[in-house]
Amino acid sequence: MDISNSIEVIKSLADSSRLRVLNSLINKPQYVEELAHRLDLAVSTVSFHLKKLEGAGLVRKTKEQYYIIYYANDDILNLTLRKLLDFNNTEKNSQDNRIEKYREKVLKTFFRKTKLIKLPVQRKKQLIVLEEFKTKFNSGYEYSENEVNEIITESFDDYCTIRRLMVEEGMMGRDNQVYQIKENLTVGTNKMIDKKELKKKYKQTLPPMGIYQIKNLENGKILIGHTKNLNAKFNSYKFQLNANLHSNKYLQEDYNKFGEENFTIEVLDRLEPKEDLAINYENDLITLEELWLEKLKPFNENGYNKEKIV
């Protein structure tokens, strides 16, 4: 089952009348007029709901003499929720492709072959450049400061800045002038951590990440942002806006003017965790946010985001 089928099933069940129709059909097959009489609904209403349920594959029909008989489709009804959610996530693949294309664009802009022309000002682009430098180092190997400087200098003269930023961003560890790429090894030791156990614990504790949107239903203006914890961010924004403490004064002014009921907070895009424990999710989230900013352009009269200078 693909994601579109799963959505249709879930949407078709999100209605009390359709649930009653399906519940009645589970007990026994029936024709439209019988269902309408049994549920005290209009025939047209029952026909409408049956069409929705049939489109989702939850019911099927056969013709018997002069009547169309509807049956509950056990093949779909017997699916577990886990199976219903076990679809090929094409959106995730598309998301990964968009992020990869953006990375390639940034690298092409700031690199000439293997040489970095200049360090980007924007942090999201800096992170992409730093990730490129990270590939020049071997995981698990301990480097002296001179060795780190030499490797960086091959592509950029200001090795001090690149080295400092890699440490600050958590891409490289430093312990008594010994440097090591942060993967599955602890700096200064050769003790390997259990990768499977790390991945298991990591995925269990990682909160949902992604891009969110706050929308003003009165004028259509939006605010787009990214977060490593969507649940916490939603709660935080609701508290800040209701307490008149939000940092975006234009959003706060409209919120005070139009009221809570005229604003929605929703997820635009989710970032799925990867198996690589060294992935810098902040980098991916910033990149994903940039793509949504370019797509929706929530600036000036269209939104509350401040347009950034490249």
Image (cartoon, rainbow, N blue to C red):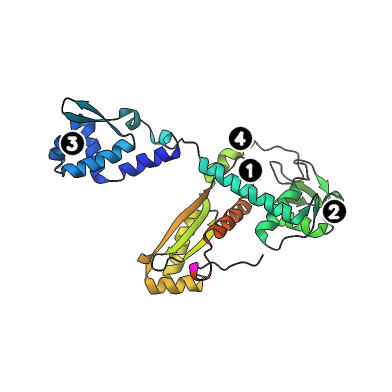
Which residue is tagged 2?
153
> Callout 1: few (<14), some (14-19), or many (20+) C-alpha neighbours within 10 Å?
some
Please, what secondary structure does the residue beneath circle 2 have? helix
Residue 106 vertical position relative to residue 40 in the rendered view, above or below:
below
Q: Nearer the viewer, mark 3 or mark 4?
A: 3
Please, what secondary structure does the residue beneath circle 3 have? helix
Please, what secondary structure does the residue beneath circle 4 have? helix
Please, what secondary structure does the residue beneath circle 1 have? loop
Q: From this viewpoint, which residue is outermost toward the top? A: 65
Marks 1 and 2 close (CB-CB < 8 Å):
no
Q: Is residue 68 left or right of residue 258?
A: left
* Residue extent of the magenta highlight: 302-308
Residue 124 vertical position relative to residue 250 in the rendered view, above or below:
above
Quadrant of the image occupied by residue 239: bottom left
Quadrant of the image occupied by residue 58: top left
- Please state, as top left, top right, bottom left or bottom right, where the C terminus lies in the image: bottom right
Closer-to-camera residue (136/244): 136
Q: Nearer the viewer, mark 2 or mark 4?
A: 2
Which residue is tagged 4?
196
